[in-house]
Image (spheres, coloured by chain):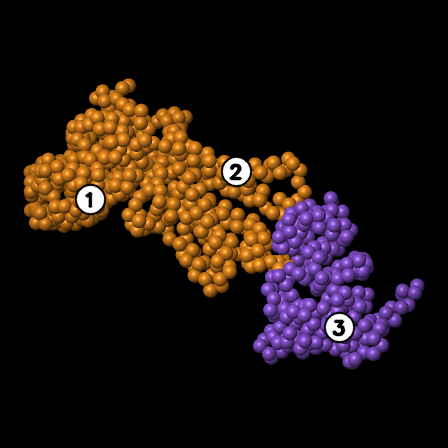
Amino acid sequence: MITLSQVSKSFDGGTTFAVRDLFLEIKDGETLVLLGSSGCGKTTTLKMINRLLEPSSGKIEVDGRDILAQNPIELRRSIGYVFQGIGLFPHMTVGQNIEIVPRLLGWPPRERRARAQDLLGLIGLSPGEYAGRLPEELSGGQQQRVGVARALAADPAYLLMDEPFGALDALTRDTLQQELLSMKKVLGKTIVFVTHDIFEALTLGDRIAVLHEGELQQVGEKEEILRVPATPFVRELFEKPAKQLAAFGGFFDE
Amino acid sequence: MNDPSWAAFLADHAGELLLRTGQHVVLTAVSTGLAIGLGMPMGILAFRVRWIRAPIVGVVGILQTIPSLAMLVLLLALLGKIGTVPAVIALTLYALLPIVRNTLTSMEEVSSEVLEAARGIGMTHWQQLSMVRLPLALPVIIAGIRTAAVVCVGIATLSAFIGAGGLGQFINRGLALNNTRLILLGAIPAALLALLVDFAIGAAGWALDPRKKAKRQSRQDTTIRAAVICLPFVLLVGGLGAYFETRPDVVIGSKNFTEQLILGHMMAQVIEDQTDLKVERRFCLAGTMICHGALVNGEIDLYAEYTGTALKTVLGREGSADPDEVYQLVSQEYARDYDARWLTPFGMNNTYAITVRAKDAKEHGWKTISDLAPFAEELRAGFTAEFAERPDGYPGLRKAYGFEFGNAKDLDPGLMYKAIAGGEVDVIAAFATDGRIAAYNLMPLVDDRKFFPPYYAAPVVRNQILTEYPELREVLLSLGEILDDATMQQLNFAVDHEKRNPAEVVREFLLSRKLIAP
């Protein structure tokens, strides 16, 4: 379980806040989506969980332990992270990229190689064909699958995903979302997923936390949020796409 | 001008060319290696520690702006040592800039997304550096190393001035003797070497590029890459091989004027003829103190020195007019202070000679320097820069004779004789053994106040080499008293005026005296 209590983050010494007084609880095994437009503080929140950023005030606990009391290097190695820009190492092969965290953790080479093969299988890339390739030889969708595999390599209990599918085309994004859904069932990971895409949030999230200008607007299951929006912002947020869909409804029917 | 074919010239110099190229490669490789060892950590440090960045980049940049010759001379003065050490230091300093700058820049330019990933998955600072930044920066760093190595090849040609050998040796000798072929013999291989080094490192860099290396590769491809990575090392091993293959037993030095080259060749040729020792000619060192320093440090084993010069310039003693007394004195002092030995002088006395045109002397009845006193006001003098300054030159002369010339200007030694023959000056301080005295119809005046000390040339040899190769002594003694001023004048004239190759002139002379076998 990850808990954030009264967490604030300011980059200018307290004049403005990227995140303000955030209380949030991520239960074991669930997928919580942090939803909001850019600049709302969702990525900042994610980065604070593995100490890529330090909160200005407040407390973050993972499994009941204050993360500020933990070694940041060990903490990061114990949490899988899928980056917005994918961030595969361009000079390493796909296999080496997937093996990197086990390597940092000092696994024996044979074991981590076997792990990489398994994960390549899991993300649907044939190990024989892809393990030796360089990231630049893969398509965007394949690269992001590798990014997910890399995050899963050391079998972490938690997975942080920062708009992982944001840069992909709609079809690929849909495929990857479905893959993630089925993978989630198999793996049983606790996932914090950041997105600005409402449909992605609705597809993937067990619960959704809506952030706006650094403040939490509402957190809850999607039916609940859709039914009883807590603030005007939340209502508008979900109404707009519904209207758009309705407006285009005619085209889709034909 | 004696003009053998290029082929003969090359065949003649092939052995030495190999040695010089070897020295050149070793100089370049050692300096570049040191610059990599220093420059990469400096670049990384500058990258990691922000406040130190500007000072490091600044200092390294300023080093680059120091003219190379000035740098070499400066290091020479600082270290009090000639030869390879100051040369390697100078080259290393020049090679630093491209390596430091490229290391720093390339590490700064690694994409922020990749770096965030490195941090986010839990790499320590050191791991981010060694696993991500450095491998990604490698191609740019190698480009810097490539630049550095090429700069080194170029500047290494200058280090011959301070006795570090290399291809610059040919260039120096060519300049001293005004011989274009010798200059080209140094310059063309140096240029080719620069291209080769550039290519070799470029190829190794291509093979090391992590992105290309990781691509699925056939066995053949892997072999090619491995071979290509070895290129710079092959070059280095070849250089070392050439260097050691031709490594000499005895190193002979000389100063940078004709007579010194002739005496140097003379010693070298008799040693080569009568012993099996391998001789290196490290000629054209820039002046007395450099030769002396080289001898004391064991970088050369022997050279021809003049008694008067040793007394005044090296030992800083007052002069004496008696040749034997001076010889005894320098022998004792050298044996005591420098562990070196003066052997029997060659016989000629290359003192300064105040010289006028023969027809003027006849007209005015000049025989001695004192005879010039009544005319001094109207006479125009031309002196070498060294004579104009040395205590045993013009300053002392004025005091000793109590007059000075109406006009005195500094002239290049080569121009001085032309100037007096052409009537542009009336008096020069010639070298007594210079062939041009006779050729230009000049007349040396008698030093009636015995101002100039004797300058008898003799081999000065390190005792250590005499112990190591005792046969050297006998061989060098065979050159004792074989030259008088007139003979030396002829030999000098053959080189200076007839533009003949000094080695050949010496060979003919030694053959005629039956000092070497035909």
Please give the chain letter of the residue carrying mark 3: A
Judged from the image, the secondary structure of the residue bearing numbered disc 1 is helix
Instruction: Work out whether residue A126 or residue B29 is closer to the camera in this orientation and state it.
Output: A126
> Which element is circle 3 on?
strand
The N terminus of chain B, quarter of image: top left
The residue where tag 2 is placed is B231
Q: Is residue A205 above or below residue A141?
A: below
Instruction: Tell me how far mark 2 sits from mark 1, CA to CA.
Output: 47 Å
x and y, in percent, of residue A245 in the image: 86, 69
Res. B77 visible in picture: yes
**Which chain shows up in orange?**
B
Q: Which residue is at a point 80% across and 58% down the rendered structure image?
A: A186
- Mark seen at residue A196: none
For label 1, the crowd category at 10 Å Cα-Cα, with few meaning under 14, some 14 to 19 and many 20 or more, is some
Front position among marks 1 and 3? 3
Count the numbered circles shown. 3
